[in-house]
Image (cartoon, rainbow, N blue to C red):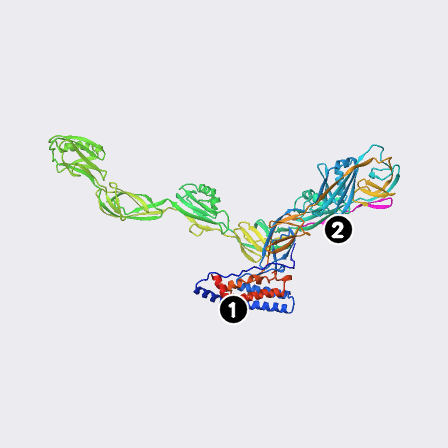
Amino acid sequence: MSISSVSGATSSGGLLIERFSSAVRGSSTTQTSVAEQATSSTPSLDRITRLIEKLKEQSLNAARTNQVERLDSFQSTIDEALSEIGFLAGVEFSAGGVDQAVVTGAEASQLKDVQVLGLPPGAEASFSGAVVRKSAGASTTVDNIGRLLSGGGSLQLNSGGDSRTIYVNKGGSLGGLVRSINDGGYGVQASEIDNRLRLTSRSTGPSSSLEVISRARRTVRGPEGLQVSGLNASQITNVAADGLDPNQSITVSGSRDSVATTAELTYQGDSQGRVSGTATFQLNGDQGSQTFSATKGESLEDLAARISAASDQTGVIATVDGDQLRLTSLAKGDDASVSITDISAVQETSVSGVEPDEFSRFDLVSMPADTQVTVSGSITQAAETANLTYRGAVGSEVVETATFTLSGANGSAEVNVTQGESLADVADRINASSSSTGVLARVDGDDLQFESSDVGSAQSVSVTLDRITQDISVTGVDPAKIDNFTVESAEHRSSNTLSGSIDQAATKAQLTSNSNGVSSSSATFSLTGELGSETFSVSWLQSLSSLRNDINDATDRTGVVASIESGRLKLTSSEYGSDAIVELDVLSGSFGTSGGDGNGNAQGTDAELTINGNAVTADRNHVDYSDSLGSYSFDLVADQSGAIADITIDSTDRDFDIEGGDGDGNASGLDAVATLNGVEYTGTGNRFEETIDSAQLDFEVTQGFVGAINPVTVESKAAEFSIGGGDGNGEASGQNGTATIDGVSFSSATDTFEAIVDGESVQIQFASNFTGTFDDLTLTGGDFVANRSAGSQTYHASGRSQYVEINGERLYEQAGRYLAEQNGVQISFALDASASGTIGPITVTGTKSESSDSYLPVLEGQQQLAVQSVLPSLFQLASGGAYSGDAYAPSQTLSVLIEALDQLQGLSGQSSRQGRSLQGFALDVSA
């Protein structure tokens, strides 16, 4: 496919810049500052003015001398000046013109070529679409073919300016007629559709046309119309001579010298009857062309089937003969042709010398065509997995109950182990989740090995201990004040110290009788303690000791203990704390008590403590204390108070021994390292994706291999595609058969020859493949013609054109090309014969100007805006602009340059020809 530019006139209107003046002005201060900024001359502005003046002088000289300066050197000067002006004004400049066009995205498989017809400066376009309809030949169906076959007759074919007549014998078959037409080189393709004859012109497109005139005959009663004697059916199968008068005889003699031949080429496959190399090719026959793909290793039978299935489009069928594929034209004679063109054989690659104990895989990704590279060297470091070891107990068991996080390249998982369980069970659980962690486990003696599932530096194994059975130690407990100190829980790996004091000891509830020794009166009272109530009676002068004994007999029901102290009865709760009570309620008589609330009610108190600065109330003498480091419980020795000795609680991990890696439970794998062709490479694990010399390779080293490698050779060469026969260059043609009749030589692409014998037209149909001298024939006309005309019928058809849709617009082919336009960019393109489906996108841009080497800075602010306002008209002078190429004229160019200078003169405060200074321009822009 070629991409070219076509010089010619390119017309593009200039960009209209409307002048305006602001109706609203800012404050005087603003006006002054903006105007001063705009009218201050700068080196960059001076440079722009000088460049335009230089171009004006050259154009003025051309106008004065009436010379049309359109030399490449002058256009190049304009483009260079505009490029620098654009740079200084902060605008990217892109020259137009077909010579500057850059075309991308033109697929060689779809397009023959693309030509750029017009490209305005700064323009770009993208063309995309599809082939919507392919061109087709003129096609018509002969409806009265049944009548024609039953009674005989003729078909007159008018196509492409040629007129041919086909004689149809009475009683013939439709299939035989189709074969005779296709073999006869009549310029049409015949086919059988629903017992009708379908005829299609071989030429395609709207200019193709086909007219078919069908003339049928009918048989009338009477003697036979033509008498033939001497007919040898092994030589001649049919003779016709409709022009003989009744009883007129002629003698026909001669020979059939040669049989019409087909065109034939051969494709050489491999010894197994398969395609020897992958390639695409275009198969051309007298009916058209088609592109085929052949894949190395596929059977020739399969390829032949695909080619023959498209024979109605090419006129070529394929057969297999051993290790050869024969491509034969359906037609015979001079018009028969077969050719192979546009062969595109793929580059076949090979890899040799790979040893499986060195490389598990060695693939060639790509390399330049027809090149060979040999790889030699050594593997200097084997890739390794990441590894850690858990030291188990004797018998391959877990040492202590623990929970840990196992992490690998794929993720993490929590693992729970129980003291005494087998390491094999742990390994099974870990391996069951290896897909989510990338870590495998195996038992090695009394140890558990953690190993990454793959090798390489990207692989990792990490073990983080989360929880484990703790060893708890308690020191400093003072048994004189503290009893039953218990650690309920402790934070892992923590140390806590409890210090403080017993601020108030727990007390019991207590009442004392007023009587001394004996009861001073009779009474009945209810005594209630923490456990319940009992009723007691006392008589006047009854000893208090006997009452004590009665009360103590019920202690297990009341929780009250009685005693005699100093002759008085003392009632005391059996327990300490706020839940301990003694309540005496006199039901009759009189029994006075003291203590409690003075009304016969007493209650004990709980112990009060301070621990690590926190006030704590005990439950009687029992203390539960918790802080961030643990929870503890203990009992206070009764009636003790004062400072408590410091108690220290230490929580430490039991054994969880992880070895390997960095010593902190982390390990990483290693990548393989190789030195090949003198260069050191580091793989990804065992895999290397490298370009060595010109070969892009992808290979994997066999796990664990280190050492010198056997040299490996990679090669790319074109697949074998051998075509034989024909002219030796992939083209073959058929030949007409010849016959000598009554001394005159005739030719035909079929078995039927038309000859003139004694002034009469004679049609002779030879037996297939017969050659040699035939027996003399005597033809005698009958009493009257047996067959008479049964009328004629005419059929007309025209071909259809191919069209495409580009950027939503339907385009028709004109002289083999399509014209498209977008944004002023005009292109012309021709499609490949096999093109179908999507086209493009085809992108056309101008050549972008390279960064200017100007040492001057880019303009800013109002000066930049003022210069940018004149650029659209100046850019029309560039290649591809409205005033370049064939449209160039010195006077037009001079007018554009003078106008630009007029506008820029105001930058120094000078008045332009239109009376508008830059100060006014700047103020308008500011407003």
Left or right: residue 762 versus residue 587 is right
Q: Nearer the viewer, residue 314 or 502?
A: 314
Magenta segment includes 744: yes
Q: Estimate the spatial distance between the alpha carbons at disc 2 and disc 1, rounded to whole Å.
A: 81 Å
Number of residues whose C-alpha sits closer than 10 Å to that of mark 1, classed few (under 14), some (14–19) or many (20 or more): some
User: Who is closer to the viewer here, 384 or 45?
Assistant: 45
Check disc 2 and give the amino acid type. Asp
In this rendering, would 219 be left or right of 141? right
Q: Position of residue 610 (x, y in %)?
A: 25, 47
Q: Nearer the viewer, mark 2 or mark 1?
A: 1
- Residue 154 lies, in percent from the top left, at 78, 40
Question: How many circles with numbers are drawn on the protein?
Answer: 2
Could one spot residue 743 in this view of the protein? yes
| Kind of residue at disc 1 | Gln
**Hey, which quadrant is residue 211 in on the image?**
top right
Q: Are marks 2 and 1 in contact (CB under 8 Å)?
A: no
Percent across and percent down for residue 525 are: 16, 31
Residue tagged by mark 1?
A: 910
Residue at (71, 48) in percent of width and height:
207
Q: What segment carries the magenta color?
A: 719-746
Q: Which label belongs to residue 727?
A: 2
SS of the residue at dot 1? loop
488 is higher (above) or lower (below) than 816: above
